[in-house]
Amino acid sequence: MLASFFFSALAGYLTRHVEAPLEALIARVIKVDIRLDALEFRVLTFGLMLMLAAVATALVGADSSAYMAATGALLGFFGKDLYAFLRDPNKTGGVDEDDWDGELDEAGRRRVKDHGSGESDTEETLRSVRLALQDSDGPQVDPTDGVTDKEHER
């Protein structure tokens, strides 16, 4: 089963590298203009590579498992992207600069800078509620009218 996982992971990893030579080989051998979308051709290449992985597993005489083959293939295909994500989850797609503007307190902990106008979360929420009540179709009500601190404590 481990051979199935290994060969499938290798097939998944090599899919992107084999795509261009396979396309040239198909164009040379078949000599028919087959129009496939780039995604469709990648799926075709992935399937052919998995078939080669299954043949390689059978040639070594190892037991095969569909679950191990699928897991290996997915990890092989998406491994590079998964590794990049695990290294920096906040990194923007392909850009070297980080879109996160917090600071690192300690390993694994991040502190976000305060970008607000100095208002606390409660004040901002109350301001938003007041604006929503003023914009509604009902009568204009100020939520603080007639409420004293002593009444609010009850």
Image (cartoon, rainbow, N blue to C red):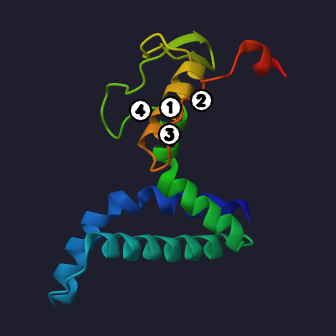
Q: CA distance from mark 3 to mark 1?
A: 5 Å
Q: Which residue is mark 3?
A: 133
> Disc 2, disc 3: CB below 8 Å?
yes
* Amino acid type for the residue under numbered disc 4: Lys
In the structure shown, which secondary structural element does the residue marked by tag 1 occupy? helix
Q: Position of residue 81 (x, y in %)?
A: 46, 45
Q: CA distance from mark 2 to mark 1?
A: 7 Å
Q: Which quadrant of the figure contains the N terminus?
A: bottom right
Q: Which residue is mark 4?
A: 91
* Amino acid type for the residue under numbered disc 1: Arg
In the structure shown, which secondary structural element does the residue marked by tag 4 occupy? loop
Please tell me how crowded label 2 is: few (under 14), some (14-19), or many (20+) other residues with Cα within 10 Å: few
Between tags 4 and 2, which lies in front? 2
Between 127 and 51, the one lying in front of the other is 127
* Amino acid type for the residue under numbered disc 3: Leu
Q: Which residue is mark 2?
A: 143
**Residue drawn at x 50%, y 74% as measured from the top left:** 52
In the structure shown, which secondary structural element does the residue marked by tag 3 occupy? helix
In the structure shown, which secondary structural element does the residue marked by tag 2 occupy? loop
